Image: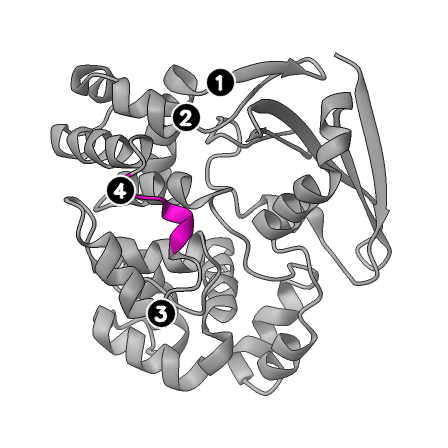
Amino acid sequence: MKAERWILPLSFPFNWNLKLKFNVLPERPTPAFVKEGKWFRAFKINGELIPVMVSSQGSIEKPRLLVSTTSAGLKHRQRLLNLIFRLHGIAYPRELYRFMGRDRVLRKVKRCLHGFGRAGLMAANLYEGIVKAIIQQQISLRVAEHLTANLVERFGEYTFFLGEKVYSFPSAETLAEAGVKELRDCGLSRRKAEYIKAFSKEVSLGNFNPEELHGLSREEIVSRLTAFKGLGRWSAELVMAASMGLNVIPADDLGVRKAISHYYFNGKLQSGEAVRKFAGERFGEFMLDVTVYLLMAYRSGI
């Protein structure tokens, strides 16, 4: 399959290798995977499966993003670039950096993670994000990523591109038709398999369009999502933060609690409610981005 390549000079510092380190399970398709500094995944756009490969060249101060796709991807150039930039948080957050520079802890974190950019997204669309939120409930992120990869390899569409098998996330129709046992064979608990199948059925039948959540208030989003079995407030907050990019954090998440407690409470683990209140008051409009920086710093041992 012939590849077409775009070279995109960026006008701000950007550390591609640092961004790739945020991938908890880079070697398996979730559906994205990383190999030798190259990021692969496929997107289903207007019924077509479009693979992409993203890499970088140049320095952190003068970076160039390299995007490869197929000839079919050329007609979706702007949409593909928007997805890539949003998924990776590729932007220069000037105001965020100014804010971080006024905080003793964040000033050091910013310096150590120079070029990280903005918070990225964990999903290309809200259906994908909601299913991932169900999978991530009450288990470690690494285990959740393995289960997601199992689901992608079993049910996702794929194509071969630049010598790699590149996947898209399974469609609602596919997961709605899957048997509970098939879903359980991917490592999911019975309840999670049932929740994903039931949610996917509502989406596939047109009874619920996840993209309609855009534009609703946060409480409306929580209300709409928690109407489904298996989706609670934690899941709704994760979807808003990690799939919609809203300035919300899943404060009950153990990783979030650990990171903020480590840097601001001498390691004494705080409750989700305490973290939610602290982060809202301390970080304000930059809460989501700051939390992602703290998570990255905590994982990296900074």
* SS state under label 3: loop
* SS state under label 2: loop
Which region shows up in magenta?
207-212
Q: Is residue 265 above or below residue 216?
A: below
Residue at image mark 3: 217
| Residue that sits furthest to the front in the current view | 206
Labels 1 & 4 near each other (Cβ < 8 A): no
- Tell me where residue 60 appears, x and y as whole percent: 79, 55
Q: Earlier in the sequence, mark 1 or mark 3?
A: 1
CA separation in Å, label 2 and label 3: 28 Å
Q: Earlier in the sequence, mark 4 or mark 3?
A: 4
**Amino acid type, residue under disc 1 in the picture:** Glu
* SS state under label 4: helix
Indicate left or right for 44 with 210 as reference: right
CA separation in Å, label 1 and label 3: 34 Å
Query: Mark 2, residues whose alpha carbon is within 10 Å: few (<14), some, or many (≥20)?
Result: many
Is 211 colored magenta in this rendering?
Answer: yes
The residue at the point 79 percent across, 15 percent down is 2
Residue at image mark 2: 170
CA separation in Å, label 4 and label 2: 15 Å
**Amino acid type, residue under disc 2 in the picture:** Pro
Labels 2 & 1 near each other (Cβ < 8 A): yes
Q: Is residue 139 above or below residue 190?
A: below
The residue at the point 45 percent across, 82 percent down is 284
Q: Earlier in the sequence, mark 1 or mark 4?
A: 4
- Asked where in the image residue 206 lies, by quadrant, the reply is top left
Residue at image mark 4: 134
Labels 4 & 2 near each other (Cβ < 8 A): no
CA separation in Å, label 2 and label 1: 7 Å
Nearer mark to the viewer, of 4 and 3: 3
